[in-house]
Structure formats: structure tokens, C-alpha cells
Image (tube, rainbow, N blue to C red):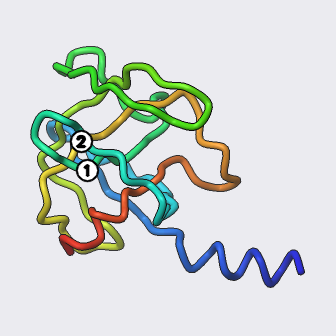
Amino acid sequence: NYFKNRAIINNFIYELDVCIDSEVVNIKAFLDTGNKLKDPYKGRPIVLVKEELIDYKDIKYILVPYNTVSGGGLLKCINISKMEVDGIKCKKKFLIGLVPSINIDGVDSIINEKIMEGL
């Protein structure tokens, strides 16, 4: 069962290349079809990324309110102009939401399903 479940999970893992200024960060990401997170201001989908992977100290960010089953709060988000998913340029405008951790083994990001519609 472990190998069967792992094979199913692997079908939802993608390689992200996120361009921040002139630096490209390569990130393994999981496509979460239940992730409907978007900013309430402009409706942009939000891709969650471990904050340790992005040097956002000198980047302007916005705070986006969110609600989950376990609570809510404000999510620090940055606007990234370019991202590729498995080598295909993302055409949608989106935000990167910075989170302390991702609780899925082997991935450092969770992709919003709306991002995949823009490929």
C-alpha cells in the first residue's frame, strides 16, 4: 500500500522555477486540488512556499487574510512576475505565500490548482 500511495502522490508533484529578481529558485511542489487560496484584493491564486527558500528581506510584501479549519490569520505574500511549472511558463498572475513549513514529505511548496489552468 505504501508504494501504491506514493505512486499516486508522485503524480501530483511538480518542479517549480521561481524567478526573483535575477535569481531562480528551484522548488519541488505538490498540486493540492483543494487549495483555493487567493488574495481578496485582486483574486490572484496563492502558491505556498517554505519561507526559508526565498530571500524576501528586501522585497515588498502584502498581508493576505486567510481562514482554515484550524484558524486564520495573515499570510505574508510576495508578487513574483515569472514562474515555470515543469518547464512551462505560468501565464496567470499569482502570489507566493510564505509559510514556515510544508507538512508533506519531499516537497517545499503547495500549488494552487488555478495556477495549472494558466499553463
Residue 44, image x, y percentages: 18, 47
- The residue at the point 58 percent across, 54 percent down is 107
Relative to 3, is 114 above or below? above
Foreground: 60 or 27?
A: 60
Which numbered disc, 2 or 1, marks the residue closer to the eye? 1
Residue 10, image x, y percentages: 62, 75
- The residue at the point 18 percent across, 42 percent down is 80
Foreground: 22 or 44?
A: 44
Q: Looking at the image, tell me whether mark 2 or mark 1 is earlier in sequence order.
A: 1
The residue type indicated by label 2 comes to: Leu
Labels 2 and 1 touching (C-beta < 8 A): yes
Q: Quadrant of residue 23?
A: top left
Residue designated by label 2: 95
The residue type indicated by label 1 comes to: Pro
In the rendered view of the protein, which quadrant contains the C terminus? bottom left
| 50 left or right of 19 in image | right
Q: Residues within 10 Å of mark 2 (few under 14, many from 20)?
A: many
Q: Residue furthest right?
A: 1
Residue designated by label 1: 45
